[in-house]
Amino acid sequence: MIKIENIESWNNLTKDFYVQDLEIESKEDLKIDGTGLIGLPVGIDIHVHFRQPGYEHKEDFVSGSIAALNGGVVKVLDMPNTDPITDSVKNIIIKKELAKKSQIDILVASAITNSNIDQLREIDEVCDAYKVFMSESFGNLSINKENIEKALSILEDIESDKPVIFHAEDPDILNENKNKKNHLKQRPPEAEGEAVRQISIWSSIYPRLKFHVTHLSSYLALRVLRVTKRNNLTVDTCPRYIFFDEKSEIEEWKKKVNPPLRSEGDRIEIKDAFSTGEIEMISSDHSPHTVEEKKEKKLSGMPGVQELLPSVFSLVKRGEITWDRGIEAYHSFPSKLLNINNASIEDGNIIIADLKEAIFIDKDWVKSKVKWSAFENLPLYANIKYVIKDGKIMLKR
């Protein structure tokens, strides 16, 4: 039995904290003094790249899960741009077997590609979500518009309940700008806005499907969403688009991501839309590359699964969002999107943290294999003391 005394814990029904003593059924015997600490729902990250198989020098399921746990995340959705690509029943099963080494729950997204449309009925039986790359990012995964529509028609026909998650950048606009002088101009907000417009049309044509746009980055895309009926279309953004913009004082090699960090105005609009719930969810898009790959090959992507919840907690600490908004963004809404049980504190799923203690991000704190973070030298909150998952202590500091 795990006994937690005098902790201020979150109640999902009342959307508030109250002081209580908790008893959690467990094979472990532990007594925790919760005085001055808060108990929060565990984290769910709907967008990570743990890089296995094929790119284990960047990350694997073991190292990725350790990074996640150190940030309070116990469930993740892993993306398909690995080697081989996760786009078949066979490759999904292989990845799920590899993921059993993880310390957390790994859900697996299947890519929808130009070559696997006819296999979607079988794939739907084993995958947890779909990922559509409307343009190239990392890995050869882009799919043309005609095949996207074929795939959506099939998924609608079989009444799939798996979310279809879109990397929303229009390929034609990217192609028109590919020779521009910098990354931001090569991937302008118009590409994201046009892609979101197209996704919104598809969401109305296929009303039984769950559409989701990930890592929203621009005010233009927000404006498109504001004139869209969003009955079956949800959105997330990432901490990087809330905390950083093109002029942020972090090393240039760290900044390159897809979509890119944009203007200060875009950042403020994204943060405000997240604070009101217009952007429903937050994800990390944990996309680790080594320092050498970032500097020499100029690859796009940054780690972030460990920083996800501290970023949310910091926004609460600064008074920029409420606890209710933060918890629904990293826990409640992702649970609904991925069709998973809303793991409750009372059922033994809890983060115990000290919101008074700042953490300063450095290489010792970072548990990802790549050992760097865009948040280095910045203070974030809170200091996570324990992570308990299904009654088992997964992290203790």
Image (tube, rainbow, N blue to C red):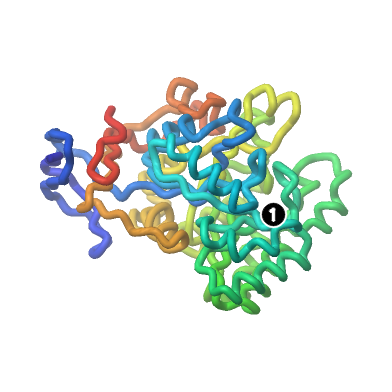
Residue 147 placement (x, y as % from top left): 75, 65
Q: Quadrant of the image for the C terminus?
A: top left
Give me the residue at 86% from left, 44% from top. Answer: 180
Above or below, comparing residue 352 to residue 272 in the picture: above
**Image height check: is 290 above or below 268?**
above
Is residue 272 among what the camera can see? Answer: no
Q: Secondary structure at mark 1?
A: strand
Q: Counting other residues with Cα less than 10 Å from the Cα at mark 1, is it few (<14), some (14-19), or many (20 or more)?
A: many
Q: Position of residue 127 (x, y in %)?
A: 53, 56
As drawn, 42 above or below 322: above
Q: Which residue is mark 1?
A: 133
Between residue 196 and residue 125, name the one nearer to us. 125
Position of residue 71 measured from the top left corner of the image (x, y, whole percent): 40, 37
- Amino acid type at image mark 1: Phe
Q: Is residue 242 left or right of residue 394?
A: right
Q: Position of residue 122 (x, y in %)?
A: 59, 62
Drawn side of residue 177 relative to residue 3, left or right: right
Q: Quadrant of the N terminus?
A: top left
